Amino acid sequence: MDDRRAREVRVNERVRAREVRLVDEEGQALGIMSGFQALQIAREKGLDLVEVSPMANPPVCRLMDYGRFKYEQSKKENEARKRQKQSEVKEVQLTPRTDEHDINVKVRKSQEFLANGDKVKIAVKYRGREMAHPELGRKVIEQVIEALKGIAIVERPLQAEGKTISVLLGRAPGWEPTRKGETAPPKVAEAPAPTTDEAAAPEEAGAPPVTTA
């Protein structure tokens, strides 16, 4: 019931019908009686007389604690709005050569976004000759996913977008921050440097291959 409708509801002396069909606080019908008699019953019970079906013949009124009723309705509407909150996609950008400290900073920021109910796009952008070694970017993304294990799940697998590869992460089912403002997931493990043989064997030129994280 919105504020406009709430203002239109007739309560107690504002019920103008000469006769009403009265329903008690338990939902039991008490029959048809005068509006005055219905109001007297409400007062004797310490409740309000609320017109719930003004278009009925005669109008239907119910006995209730109207103040409590409005509070409960407002609480339900607020909870419904929270559930309907549209999650946003927050992008966290890295490079194939992002160091361990900076990756940990990005991991903490990702957890903040997830704690707020948003999704996180982890994107690694290649520059220049880095395109020849797409495995470096994949390792960075795998480090982030591993650090967020139990906190995030992969909702969209690794894919290429021009010179960028990315995955989309969402909050893991059942995960909730243990306390407000918690933003400290486990640190990432430092990825081993590529061997001389790996660096000497570039993959095919072009966009990095798309794989499942």
Image (cartoon, rainbow, N blue to C red):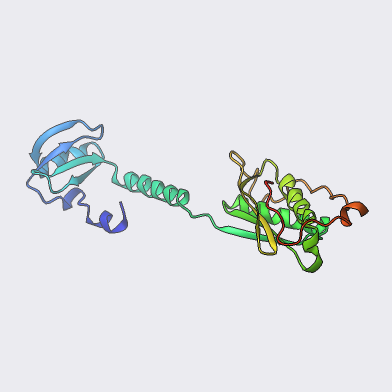
Question: Which residue is drawn at the image coordinates 84% and 50% (left, top)?
Answer: 191
Q: Position of residue 187 (x, y in %)?
A: 79, 48
Is residue 195 in view? no
Looking at the image, the residue that sits furthest to the right is 196
Looking at the image, the residue that sits furthest to the bottom is 128
Q: Nearer the viewer, residue 59 or 37?
A: 59
Q: Is residue 92 above or below residue 39?
A: below
Q: Nearer the viewer, residue 127 or 104?
A: 127
Q: Position of residue 67 (x, y in %)?
A: 32, 47
Looking at the image, the residue that sits furthest to the front is 204
The number of numbered discs placed on residues in the rendered structure image is 0
Q: Nearer the viewer, residue 31 or 80?
A: 80
Q: Position of residue 81 (x, y in %)?
A: 43, 52
Residue 152 left/right relative to 6: right
Is residue 177 in view? yes
Question: Which residue is drawn at the image coordinates 21% and 34% (left, top)?
Answer: 24
Question: Which residue is drawn at the image coordinates 14% and 40% (left, top)?
Answer: 38
Residue 59 left/right relative to 145: left
Residue 57 left/right relative to 13: left
Q: Nearer the viewer, residue 80 or 148?
A: 148
Q: Position of residue 110 (x, y in %)?
A: 67, 54
